[in-house]
Image (cartoon, rainbow, N blue to C red):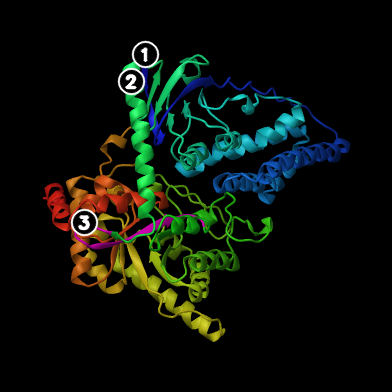
Amino acid sequence: MNVILGISAAEGIGIGKAFVLPDEQERKIPKRKISAQEVNVEWQRLTDACSQVQKEFSDFLSAKDITKDQREVLETYQLMLSDPVFMKELQDFFSKKLLNIEYSLDFKVREYADMLRNSHNGYLAERAQDIEDVFNRVLDILLDYHPFDIWLVPDGAVIIGRSMKTSDTVILGKRKIAGLALTEGSSACHVAILAKSYGIPVVVGIEDAANLAQNGETIVVDGNIGELIIQPDAATLTSANAKIVSEQKYRVNLQKFKDVPAKTEDGTVFKLYANIGTPEEAQIALDNGADGIGLFRTEFLFMNSAQKFSKQSSSSYTNSMSEDAQFEAYKRVLQIMGDKPVTIRTLDAGGDKIVEGSDLPAVSEKNPLMGLRAIRMSLYCPSVFRTQLRALYRASVYGNLRIMLPLITDVSQVETALGIAKGIRISLKEDNIPFNPDVPIGIMVETAAAAICADCLAPYSKFFSLGTNDLTQYVLGVDRENQAVNPLYNEFSLAVLRMIKNTILNAEKFNIPLSVCGEMAGNKESAVVLAGMGVRNLSMIPKQIPVIKEMLSHFSIKELENLSNRSVF
């Protein structure tokens, strides 16, 4: 028996026979000069190859048993293939350099992928692999290269390898895959995201994964603790099977919590909201029993990655979000949620969130997380802020909207933002455009400055939302994306918990609503502490809502308070 430790990317336990993915052969990309007369012919070859890949994706999309997650990934891939910005840059490079189309395409794909990987943003770094995946399929056609066929993987297999193409994950819904063990990837990659939706455990960070096992060997993948066991002994197999049965019973039991109020054993009611990044996720939030949207991250609408936000054609996908495009996105979320509250955060650009647009400055900063980002960026580029506020107010008549300002550190920022919002309301009224003039505007408390001065900020805020991810980062001075110091990132630090407690006390003092929308809200251990500290509104990824409901049902408020007091004092 061989036990290898990795990193959990999707929870669960799976047992199956190893299927080792062969290393992908390196494509040999020819480089040659072409004549001006060959340009049209070469470009047509590219167009035909893209069309062929588009058709492959369309064939997958037409399948009756395709899941929502598969559909979203494949539709995003189709948009990548026709992205006008990328194709225009490629065509300009190709026409200017007069290098064969295979080389030109490979060069621009690598350039884009490197840019995303160097963005210091986990989400964008994972999208680099998606871009390579999509356009490598086009290159395969241009080069007449025939790679490994993923459909050779049998039912019940544990897939082991260096990496797995996102587009190949369509197999996850077609085969009874027991687990994935990969060298590359993270919990934010599309492979892991899709695997989670099927309940397939994933462990990543397995060094030299493809050479650790032989095809057909029995494998246990424990995504709960990030462990891979090759050729387990009888006792280990028995234990793993018992855990699988237990998890299945737990998942079935969670179903009954989806549509009931969140409350403690003694009847104290909580409101559980969802964190989302796209309008489509609003329906997922409803399906999981969300009481509303606690955080809609609008930066994903702006990022240089096609995001689906309306039922319009692909021409609606753009890097620079127009007022109408934003309006449609916000309107859709509000309509999906009905009368449930929807808190939409204004653009949190800058820092580790790279947003490209003609109206946003391209700044080079030594310490971007401390630099021009979030509300600072919005006030630095007021035209972008005004456009977003106009879209938000226009959409406000379609539901229960709340507007949230990120990374507030000073009262003057709130005053300036409120002044701009007032100007937008006056402008809309003059233009006879319907809107709700009473939309609450609140702030995120995610810096030490905001937490310490919560009593000063409260009179200017209709609500507080504790962003515990950034709060922990800034209070402890730890970059959570830096693996070298990641062990120091501790949300249970006494300093962090006391910042949270101070914010809660000031929210109560000024009688304004408070919620927590960081990762702490959706984690069972930390949610216990927050509940005991007095938090009654928690916002998390949709799938955690039934989990937290189930957890709260086992405690009385007194028990939660006792557990919390041990952590805070």
- Name the residue carrying label 1: 1
Q: Relative to the observer, which residue lies in front, 475 or 412?
A: 475
Res 236 label: 2
Vertical position of residue 156 compared to residue 114: above or below = above
**Residue 270: within the magenta?**
yes
Where is residue 90 shown, x and y percent of the image? Answer: 71, 42
For the record, the magenta segment spans 263-278
Q: Quadrant of the N terminus?
A: top left
Q: Relative to the observer, which residue lies in front, 375 or 303?
A: 303
Q: Earlier in the sequence, mark 3 or mark 2?
A: 2
Identity of the amino acid at label 3? Glu
Disc 3 is placed on an element classified as loop
Q: Are marks 1 and 2 in contact (CB under 8 Å)?
A: yes
Q: How many marks?
A: 3
Where is residue 108 shown, x and y percent of the image? Answer: 66, 38
**Residue 117: within the magenta?**
no
Q: Relative to the observer, which residue lies in front, 156 or 532?
A: 156
